[in-house]
Image (cartoon, coloured by chain):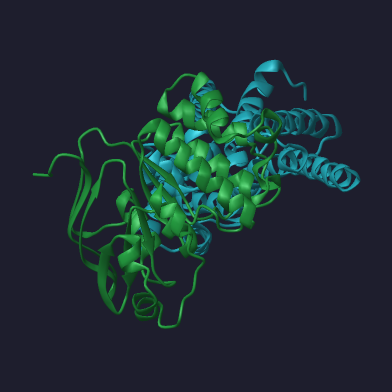
Chain colours: A cyan, B green
Amino acid sequence: MTIGIVDLALPAATAAAAGLVGSFAVLRRLALASDALSHVALPGIGVALLLHANPLLGGVVALVLGAALIWLVQRRTRLPTEAVVGVIFSAGLAVGSLFTSGEELLEALLGSSRAAGPVETGLSLGAAAAIVAWILSARHRLLLALLSEDLARTAGIRVERLDLVFLLVFALTTALGLRYLGILLMGSLIIIPAATARLMSRRLDRMLLTAVLLSVGATLAGTLAASRFGLATGPVIIALAAALFGVGVLLRRRG
Amino acid sequence: MKPAGVVLELTGMGVRFGRTTILAGLDLAVHQGETLAIIGPNGSGKTVLFRTLIGALPHEGRIAWAEGARIGYVPQKLDLERDLPVSGLDLLRARAAVAGTAVGDVDRAIQQVGLGPGIVGQPIGELSGGQFQRLLLAFALMGRPTVLLCDELTAGVDEPGEEQLYALLRRLQAEEGLTLLLISHELSLVFSHATRVLCLARSRAPCVGAPVEVLTPERLQDLYGAPMRFHRHDDDRDR
């Protein structure tokens, strides 16, 4: 199968968004929680399949609702985000697996190589651009809030609202990768390049740029390599990203 | 209505966490340009008071700031990872960007607290205790505050560093006309620098007075539940 520039545009845009969102998830020590959050898409995909609706749309709805639910429970209970995500993720996985089975479940978890239609591609590119624009414009507020909520408040930042928007943006980013990476692997693309960039950076702007380059690089190289050797796209992308993380660890130990 | 010159007025202020009362029935007026030190044993609600004043915690009673009051806050410590890829400049530039202030404000704040450009360019996890406190002070000053709240400014700083930080605070207060609220365990520094002292303890009502009235051996024993001694620079009080 030949891959054109158009086929690469959506994965590259999604990867750029994943690198930026992942950087702040890693800095907020939400790496595992962020990975788990992506699993909340499963019940939405299952319900959509039952209703013969677009499974990706179901996944997006479930992720957005899941993010809002996590924010509400956290605000009400003051439990750490990762604890709330852990509970809602387990519940999502349990309910989701009741609705999906066999090949559908495997596709939902690991993605598929089927190309997106023009409408889905256009909407997804627009969403990826919006995510990149929001993270870049909110990066100063996100930085202050992750360092100290009290300092952020004295700078006039509405921390709770910022948390909610970040969770929704995270959910949307996960949704972008559902088609080609699936639930299991999209969380990995958000976290692994950002974790590698953190190993290699001493300044925030450098970390954001490195995470984007690593994420887009692994995605493009993985997509092309998978096509060339007839392998599943998602696992190749994540294996490449993980290999780059290994290189980052080695460089860090020497440095 | 607040009397002239009062920047902060608390009336029957209290804070509860569930069924636990942390602060109760606090009445206080803070005057412009004064240095109010807050002392008390661990768990007496000093930090809770500051976090309530900046709007981070819900409260009972009334907190009234003077019109146009701008609050700067220097927290006790930040729970940071040592290898965080964030430099002092990242922090200050983020503050400037959020406030929409000129980039020149960053340089001004750095100069005010006496941090060199090489130091603010380092990752914040690599700064010494004193350098980090100066950075937080610069962060607070970037909002051009009229009132500065410092929670244990000299925690983790050696003795010469403590003196330098307090001298810096006194200079900034004179230059900017700041009102200072300081939480401190260093009673000798409190005695030297405060114009009034607020003492907090869970088991008794808050007390307020001049350092010579509050920092007596009897009152300190009553407050801390143990004899407390501190080095008293009587000549400092004459300044």
The residue at the far bottom in this view is B226
Determine the image quadrant of residue B151.
bottom left
Give B45 or B98, whichever is nearer the viewer: B45
Q: Position of residue A177 (x, y in %)?
A: 59, 37
Residue found at x 49% / y 48%:
A148
In the rendered view, does B130 fall on the left or right side of A170?
right
Q: Position of residue A217 (x, y in %)?
A: 76, 29
Where B39 falls versus A175 (above or below)? below
The residue at the far top in this view is A5
Give B148 or B90, whichever is nearer the viewer: B148
Residue found at x 56% / y 24%:
B107
In the rendered view, does B62 fall on the left or right side of B170?
left
Q: Position of residue B75 (x, y in %)?
A: 47, 51
Give B104 or B95, whichever is nearer the viewer: B104
Determine the image quadrant of residue A74.
bottom left
Q: From this viewpoint, is residue A111 visible?
A: no
Q: Position of residue A182 (x, y in %)?
A: 62, 44
In the rendered view, does A88 fall on the left or right side of B13?
right
